[in-house]
Structure formats: structure tokens, C-alpha cells
Image: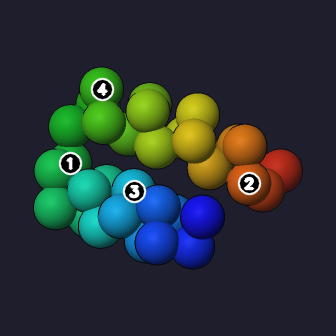
């Protein structure tokens, strides 16, 4: 899960696209409640 989390974070950093950001927010919400 940690590797997946890092991969998602990496994608968010490199691909600053609205669709990707929404996907990241959805995935992050599965791990953390911000």
C-alpha cells in the first residue's frame, strides 16, 4: 500500500491534470481523512 501511495503521489506531482488530481484525491481519501 505504501508503494501505491508513493506512486499516486508521484503521478500527482508530475501530471498536474485536473482529472489526475481528482483521482488522487479519491485515492488519498481511502487512506486518510483530510
In the image as oriented, which residue stretches furthest toward the right?
A: 33
Work out how far the residue at label 4 is from the one at label 2, CA to CA, in angstroms: 19 Å
Q: Is residue 10 left or right of residue 32?
A: left
Label 3 element class? helix
Work out how far the residue at label 2 is from the one at label 1, CA to CA, in angstroms: 21 Å
Work out how far the residue at label 2 is from the one at label 3, CA to CA, in angstroms: 12 Å
Q: Which numbered dot is residue 19? A: 4
Is 5 drawn above or below residue 20 in the view shown? Answer: below
Residue 9 appears in the rendering? no
Residue corresponding to mark 1: 16
Q: Is residue 11 left or right of residue 1?
A: left
Work out how far the residue at label 4 is from the one at label 1, CA to CA, in angstroms: 9 Å
Q: Which numbered dot is residue 31? A: 2
Work out how far the residue at label 3 is from the one at label 1, CA to CA, in angstroms: 12 Å
**In this orientation, which residue lies closer to the viewer: 3 or 34?**
3
Residue corresponding to mark 3: 8
Label 2 element class? helix
Place of residue 28 in the rendered image (x, y in percent of width and height, measured from the top left): 62, 49
The N terminus: image quadrant: bottom right
Identified at 20% across, 48% down, the residue is 16
Q: Earlier in the sequence, mark 4 or mark 2?
A: 4
Label 4 element class? helix
Answer whether labels 3 and 1 touch (C-beta < 8 Å). no
Place of residue 17 in the rendered image (x, y in percent of width and height, measured from the top left): 21, 37
Work out how far the residue at label 4 is from the one at label 3, CA to CA, in angstroms: 13 Å
Q: Quadrant of residue 9?
A: bottom left
Amino acid at each position: 500500500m505504501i508503494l501505491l501511495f508513493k506512486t499516486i503521489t508521484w503521478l500527482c506531482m508530475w501530471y498536474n491534470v485536473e482529472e489526475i488530481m481528482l483521482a488522487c484525491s479519491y485515492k488519498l481519501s481511502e487512506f486518510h481523512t483530510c
